[in-house]
Amino acid sequence: MGLSLSKGGNLSLSKEAPGFTKLKVGLGWDIRTTDGAAFDLDACAFMLGADGKVRSNGDFAFYGQQATQEGAIKLGGDNRTGAGDGDDETMELDITKVPADIHRVAVCISIYEADQRRQNFGMVRSAFARVVDLANNREIGRFDLSEDASLDTALIFAEIYRHNGEWKFKAIGQGYAGGLGPLARNFGVDI
């Protein structure tokens, strides 16, 4: 087990996993309440410059574009139910392919068609994000979302960012209304 973070906490990936080049970010959750309509939570990631925006739509990975343009981020499969233990969705980050002008990667999750299905993160429990060193499959850090994200339909879960030559992981846990569209526009994606 890696270091457990609380909201706002961060850890140095460079110190905890010296020499790492590839990470897996695992995201998981369980559904607390449902009216029978299927839940489909989707992981996505944004590579952001110093201005907090993507350089182009190629810096955005989501279910419709499984990798960023340089291949620095690649999404795993789409788990539509959240059933079972462990990671429900994953993404791989190869830091050797992250362009020099990218300062941070926002790791996010959204509920597909949340408004139409009248679903929100208040119906989700046991949500977590964890970072694993792919060289040895060792969990470096983990963030368990303990607070209720209530009516929000998208979530900025965590960030992986550069600071003074080191890579760090920060627990964010910031809910976002309106789902993936408004979240993506916030980061400068043209949709």
Image (cartoon, helix red, strand yellow):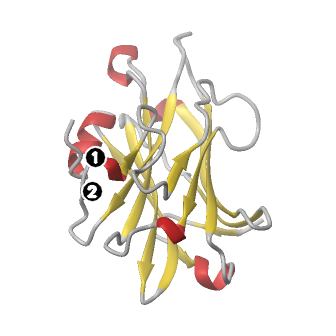
Drawn side of residue 20 relative to residue 121, left or right: right
Q: Is residue 58 above or below residue 41?
A: below
Q: Regarding mark 1 in the picture, which secondary structure is present there? A: helix
Q: Residue at the location (43% across, 43% down)?
A: 149
Drawn side of residue 185 relative to residue 95, left or right: left
Furthest toward the front, the residue is 70
Q: Residue at the location (75% across, 32% down)?
A: 84
Q: How many residues crowd around disc 2 within 10 Å: few (fewer than 14), some, or many (20 or more)?
A: many
In terms of image quadrants, where is residue 135?
bottom right
Q: Residue at the location (51% across, 76% down)?
A: 168
Which numbered dot is residue 49? none
Please state the horizontal and vertical placement of residue 52, each as a whole percent of the image. 25, 64
Please state the horizontal and vertical placement of residue 138, each as a whole percent of the image. 77, 66
Residue contact at pointers 2 and 1, CB within 8 angstroms: yes
Q: How many residues crowd around disc 1 within 10 Å: few (fewer than 14), some, or many (20 or more)?
A: some
The amino acid beneath tag 2 is Val
Viewport quadrant of the N terminus: bottom right
In terms of image quadrants, where is residue 104?
bottom left
Residue 170 in view here: no
Which numbered dot is residue 57? 1
Which numbered dot is residue 54? 2
Q: Residue at the location (49% across, 35% down)?
A: 42
Of 89 and 8, which appears nearest the observer?
Answer: 89
Viewport quadrant of the C terminus: top left
Residue 120 in view here: yes
The amino acid beneath tag 1 is Asn
Please state the horizontal and vertical placement of residue 101, each as a whole percent of the image. 31, 73
Mark 2 to mark 1 CA distance (whole Å): 7 Å
